[in-house]
Image (cartoon, rainbow, N blue to C red):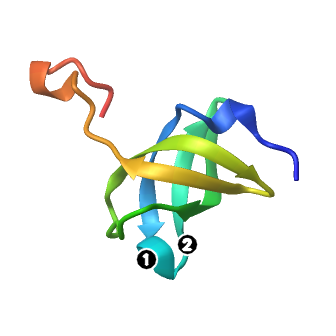
Amino acid sequence: MEQDDAVIGCTGEVLIGTRGSGGPGEVLVRVRGGSETFLAWSEEPLPRGARVLVVESRGTRQVDVIEWADPLDELGLGTG
């Protein structure tokens, strides 16, 4: 399984909630000038609509994510 390094560090939105250790969900990630969907794994369950940051690629269109709050949003500078 070849990693997709381009997706690491990208942000996205949960389309189908993740279940933590119970299984993956699905995320829409802004990458390569567009948006792509990936199976998403997280340590804690994440609900639909949560903003996420991709922290690792598992290859074969699967990623590890964490919930993400852009610190620039508080300053009104985020790309939100």
Q: Quadrant of the C terminus?
A: top left
Q: Residue at x 33, y 26 (%)?
A: 79
User: Relative to 75, does residue 52 appear above or below in the rendering?
Assistant: below
Residue 27: percent from left, percent from top: 52, 59
List the residue tagged with mark 2.
24
- Residue at (87%, 45%) from the top-left corner? 2
Tag 1 or tag 2, which sits nearer the N-term?
Answer: 1
Query: Is residue 61 found left or right of 78 in the rendered image?
Result: right
Q: Nearer the viewer, residue 43 or 14?
A: 43
- Give the secondary structure at mark 2: loop
The image quadrant of residue 44 is bottom left
- CB atoms at circles 2 and 1 under 8 Å apart? yes
Q: Is residue 78 above or below residue 17?
A: above
Element type where label 1 sits in the image = loop
Instruction: Give residue 35's position: percent from left, percent from top.
Output: 60, 45
Kindly identify the amino acid type of the residue bearing the numbered disc 2. Answer: Pro
In the rendered structure, find residue 49 and report the number of the disc placed on it: none
Q: Position of residue 52 (x, y in %)?
A: 40, 48
The three-letter code of the residue at mark 1 reads Arg
